[in-house]
């Protein structure tokens, strides 16, 4: 019995061992199944590929990713990235890839029975930065240098721009000063300009492709010293004999400033007088030029010097105030208002004697002032206070007397300290006037308009000549040398080319700028198709110009001088329709059908329209 039990136990153990042995052989016999997955982290030289062992992982002795740029079915005999992941996932980092290259890859698993592969997939490695180099600087001056560069490798992309960048810092970028010297591969060079002397510069070549901006190693060079950089900025406070000038030393040129200032003269190419400014630093500077001549044009430039020489800013031009005297006439006639509202006398650049015309409506006194301070040096009066005008000026002096009232020519010489008063009454005369060239009794006297400060009259003139004269004599007379409406003492006769009734005006209110006008007046409008003017005639009894017109249909009209729209011939409308003409071109004057008498006062700028 015991023997049977032992025999049965032995058979059971043998069967158990046989069962276990069969299970191990079955597991080892399962073939791995491998799947290739996506790729991540692609750069220009690396990429990470993924895979997975679907079954049979226990039999795998090595797993990873194999890859090739030439074989579409890469094997482990080519390049491979062994996975260190201890799970069924396969992760392999492919290294030392070529940029912008297509690679084929697949997951693999090695087991006792061989090698299993997943499906083949592919990817393209990224573009990399272009490769660019820079050569040493050449042709170095104080202001410039030449540097060459070369793009030797496009990085698998397209170089859209290349050039140089520079700064006085150690690592310039394209955000600093830079050039653009084309595209693609090859050698290029740039002239670096507007550099500062005696300064160290750093330069890098650059190239731009799809991967970004690449730079060469930085090179450095030092510019030479040069003359300073200077600007001439402005000229201010110009008087007869002085002027203030302003400039700026922007840079030393790399060497110490030894002198700075301003050079000036009366010719742009002969700045032969220097005014130095203290100091040897950069920055703004100014100086006062004195001892200048009145009414003379001068040229001036700022300068600075260093060991390399003298440098100038731009040459500026100015003219000193002419030796012109201006006196305000301040007295009883204007309530002793010593301001710019007062009338004044003015000299010319060629004479120290100032003159002007003032109408005094009553007797009284006045003084002359050169400013509005009433200070003694700026106030001029008569030397005596005895009720008699001496013609001698002193500071501040007694009142200069006016008696009788009238329209006076006043002359005053601030250097010789003299003055004179001449009462004047003005008239028109000449072969064009009704009385011809006169004896004194036949002058055509003019009327003074205090409001407009003009003399005026109306005359029927022939096509001949005209002048203005004072006090029925030729001591003070005006003609027109330029036939331009400006008057000169003793000037040429004024030509009247068309006969007609004229409104004549003499304006002596602006010293040294005396003018006149002699205008015929007409009416033009819709009633005559804006054609030829209907000429107006002088109505001496009513002191107006007048004309009759017939209007067939409603429309508008204007007044115009000398049958012309061209300047300086005036024309007037009435924007408001209130009977007062506009000095600027106004609207047409509206008029209804009918027959009318129209009048015009060309001095008061008023008109009437009366239906007949």
Image (spheres, grey):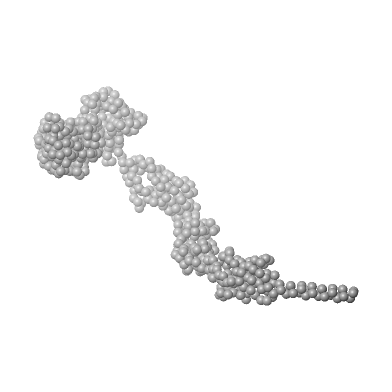
- x and y percent of residue 47 in the render? 59, 66
Residue projecting furthest to the left: 435
Where is 413 relative to 141, above or below? above
Q: How many discs appear?
A: 0
Image: 32 above or below 285:
below
In the rendered image, the quadrant that contains the N terminus is bottom right
Tell me where residue 528 appears, x and y as whole percent: 14, 42
Q: Is residue 186 left or right of residue 424?
A: right
**In which image quadrant can residue 296 be found?**
top left
Using the rendered image of the protein, determine whether residue 133 is visible from the camera's viewpoint.
Answer: no
Going by the image, does 275 lie left or right of 357?
A: right
Q: Is residue 570 above or below residue 24?
A: above
Horizontal and vertical percent for residue 533? 14, 41
Residue sitting at x 54%, y 63%? 217
**Residue at figure coordinates x 29%, y 31% from the top left:** 342
In the rendered image, residue 545, in percent from the top left (x then y), is placed at 14, 34
Query: What residue is rendered at 9% in x and 35% in y?
Result: 435
Give the position of the C terminus as an image quadrant: top left
- Residue at 11 percent of width and 40 percent of height: 499
Which residue is at the front of the view, 5 or 276?
Answer: 5
Q: Which image quadrant for residue 430?
A: top left
Residue extending farthest to the top is 386
Which residue is more in the foreground, 11 or 405? 11
- Of residue 504 and residue 76, the one placed in the foreground of this image is 76
Res 282 visible: yes
Q: Nearer the viewer, residue 598 or 1?
A: 1
């Amino acid at each position: 019995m015991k023997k049977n039990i032992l025999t049965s136990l032995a058979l059971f153990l043998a069967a158990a061992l046989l069962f276990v042995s069969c299970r191990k052989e079955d597991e080892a016999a399962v073939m791995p199944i491998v799947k290739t997955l996506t790729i991540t982290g692609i750069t220009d030289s690396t990429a990470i590929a993924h895979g997975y062992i679907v079954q049979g992982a226990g039999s795998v002795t090595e797993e990873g990713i194999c890859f090739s740029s030439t074989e579409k079915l890469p094997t482990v005999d080519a390049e491979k990235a062994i996975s260190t992941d201890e799970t069924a996932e396969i992760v392999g980092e492919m290294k030392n890839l070529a940029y912008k290259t297509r690679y084929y890859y697949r997951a693999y698993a090695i087991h006792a029975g061989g090698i299993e592969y997943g499906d083949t997939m592919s990817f393209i490695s990224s573009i990399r930065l272009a490769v660019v180099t820079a050569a040493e600087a050449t042709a170095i001056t104080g202001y410039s240098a030449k540097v060459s560069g070369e793009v030797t490798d496009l990085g698998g992309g397209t170089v859209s721009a290349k050039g140089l960048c520079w700064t006085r810092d150690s690592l310039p970028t394209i955000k600093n000063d830079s050039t653009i010297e084309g595209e693609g591969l090859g050698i290029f060079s740039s002239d670096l300009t507007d550099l500062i002397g005696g300064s160290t510069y750093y330069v890098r070549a650059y190239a731009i492709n799809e991967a970004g901006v690449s730079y060469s190693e930085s090179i450095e060079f030092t510019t030479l010293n040069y003359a300073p950089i200077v600007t001439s900025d402005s000229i201010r406070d110009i008087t007869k004999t002085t002027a203030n000038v302003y400039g700026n030393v922007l840079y030393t040129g790399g060497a110490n400033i030894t002198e700075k200032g301003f050079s000036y003269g009366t010719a742009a190419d002969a700045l032969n007088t220097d005014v130095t400014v203290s100091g040897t630093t950069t920055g703004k500077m100014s100086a006062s030029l004195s001892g200048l001549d009145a009414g003379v044009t001068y040229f001036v430039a700022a300068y600075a010097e260093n060991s390399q020489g003298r440098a100038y800013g731009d040459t500026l031009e100015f003219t000193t105030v002419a030796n012109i005297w201006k006196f305000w006439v301040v007295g009883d006639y204007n309530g002793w208002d010593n301001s710019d509202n007062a009338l004044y006398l003015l000299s010319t650049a060629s004479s120290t004697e100032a003159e002007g015309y003032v109408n005094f409506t009553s007797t009284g006194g006045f003084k002359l002032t050169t400013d509005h301070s009433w200070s003694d040096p700026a106030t001029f009066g008569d030397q005596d206070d005895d009720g008699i005008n001496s013609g001698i000026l002193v500071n501040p002096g007694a009142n200069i007397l006016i008696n009788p009232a009238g329209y006076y020519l006043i002359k005053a010489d601030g250097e010789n300290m003299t003055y004179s008063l001449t009462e004047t009454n003005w008239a028109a005369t000449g072969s064009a006037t009704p009385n011809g060239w006169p004896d004194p009794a036949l002058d055509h006297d003019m009327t003074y308009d205090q409001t407009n400060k003009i003399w005026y009259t109306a005359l029927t003139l022939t096509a001949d000549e005209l002048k203005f004269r004072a006090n029925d004599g030729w001591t003070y007379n005006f003609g027109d040398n330029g036939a331009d409406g400006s008057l000169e003492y003793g000037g040429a006769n004024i030509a009247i080319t068309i006969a007609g009734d004229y409104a004549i005006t003499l304006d002596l209110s602006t010293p040294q700028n005396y003018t006149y006008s002699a205008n015929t007046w007409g009416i033009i409008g819709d009633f005559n198709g804006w054609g030829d003017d209907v000429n107006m005639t002088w109505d001496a009894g009513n002191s107006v110009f007048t004309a009759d017109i017939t209007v067939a249909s409603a429309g508008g009209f204007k007044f115009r001088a000398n049958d012309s729209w061209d300047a300086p011939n005036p024309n007037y409308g009435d924007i408001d329709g209130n009977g007062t003409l506009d000095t600027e071109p106004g609207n047409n004057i509206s008029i209804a059908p009918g027959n009318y008498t129209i009048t015009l006062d060309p001095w008061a700028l008023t008109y009437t329209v009366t239906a007949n």
